[in-house]
Amino acid sequence: MKNLFLSLAFALAAIATPAFAQQVQPIDGIAAIVDEDVILQSELERALRNIKAQYGNRADQLPPETVLRRQVLERLILVQLQTARAQSTGVRVADEELDAAAAAIARQNNMTPDQLRQQLAGDGISYDEFRGSLRDELAIQRLRQRFAQSTIMVTDAEVDAALASQASGTQYRLANILVALPNGATPQQIAMAEEKIEGVQGLLERGEMDFAAAAVRYSDGPNALEGGDLGWRGIDEIPTAFSSVVGGLQPGQMFGPARGPSGFQLLQLVDIRDSTQAASGQSVTQYQASHILIRGDDAAAKARIDSLHAAVTGGSSFASVASESSDDTVTREAGGDLGWFTHDEFGPQFGEQVAALQDGEVSAPFRSQAGWHIVQRVGSRQASVDDENRRNQARETIGQRKLEDEWNRFLREMRGEAYIDIRPASGAVGDS
């Protein structure tokens, strides 16, 4: 799922972007009241600087300042609601876990723990505040895990349907633009949302903007800043409102606007591919590779992955760099080794990067939902795919897709039930 979560570096961006911190001083004041807590204006400004730093010389792809402020503030509100829910449901993070995570963050920023403390103090952030933010991030991750375990079920019938869909040999890569509606939307709110989505549709039909740019600028979806990309899906993984028409579209064509549970949507068919080989049960291409992961999507994470890329292309052992610096705790001790995997096992974007490499070649840094990666391809082979493996892969894919949908619904419900007072100084319109 496109990550609705903010990394610790997003919440404490001043740690990683001192140049920006020197240019803009924190603003005292309240940006929003969220139930019994508040989001400070300085937190909002820090998060905005982080997003702008991430886009760098692509700032023209960002929406207008007022829209961007609203998007970022909404993310901060959702983070606040999730941490409050985690606490109320008994999620706890041990001090030992905090210590380990803080040490990892220090390593990511090429610091010792004492140097990290000094950097925090220099940016006006107490170490207790830092630990509190880190505790919240870990608690959100645990809340999501509990939610998945208690909510997501995949039946054998769903697996059978997915395998039958794969046998048809067709998968669709989709993107969407969402104009969201609140729970219990009034007729006026519905009319305004419909007018907005039709206006966006008009821009696209007149060729004044491409779909991805319009998604970044206008979509309320959690994948807006990724151009609305929904990834590759079989026909059984597409909502019923769209599945009946997707097969009749050509790449680049749109469908909608259509109203769904979240609001009004425009859907674009980005591409089509044949997955018959993977579904045939006879053979499939597998790759062996190692990777280095740096979590986060901010300027600090990008700078860190660039530094590690320079190290491995400059002669350092890939395995040694992965063991010392990767944030993937599962593969780190094995030098980043991922073993053998199929093209889409870690997501289509990851698979495309590996497939484009030659054996022994190291990729340039690239980003996925998990963070920034460097990959070294070790080898490739043709392997048989038995029925049980295919069923397990299908079950995992369906579970992840269900979790994405259900978690987003859960977040919308929390947002709708909460008392939210957005102050005018934050650049958005207040509501409750």
Image (cartoon, rainbow, N blue to C red):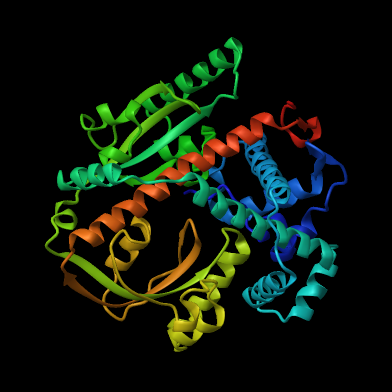
Against 23, residue 159 (above or below) is above
Measured from the top left, where is residue 52 in percent x and y?
A: 63, 51
The residue under the point 54% across, 34% down is: 220
Q: Residue 96 occupies which quadrant of the picture? A: bottom right
Left or right side of 387 for 339: right
Q: Residue 260 occupies which quadrant of the picture? A: top left
Can residue 320 be seen here? Answer: yes
The residue under the point 19% across, 51% down is: 275
Measured from the top left, where is residue 352 in percent x and y?
A: 31, 61
Measured from the top left, where is residue 51 in percent x and y?
A: 62, 51
- Considering depth in this image, is 51 or 7 the residue closer to the camera? 7
Q: Residue furthest right?
A: 28
Against 373, residue 74 (above or below) is above
Q: Residue furthest top?
A: 187
The residue under the point 75% across, 27% down is: 430
Q: Work out which quarter of the rendered image holds the C terminus and state it.
A: top right
- Considering depth in this image, is 119 or 131 the residue closer to the camera? 131
Measured from the top left, where is residue 70 in percent x and y?
A: 66, 36
The residue under the point 53% across, 39% down is: 408
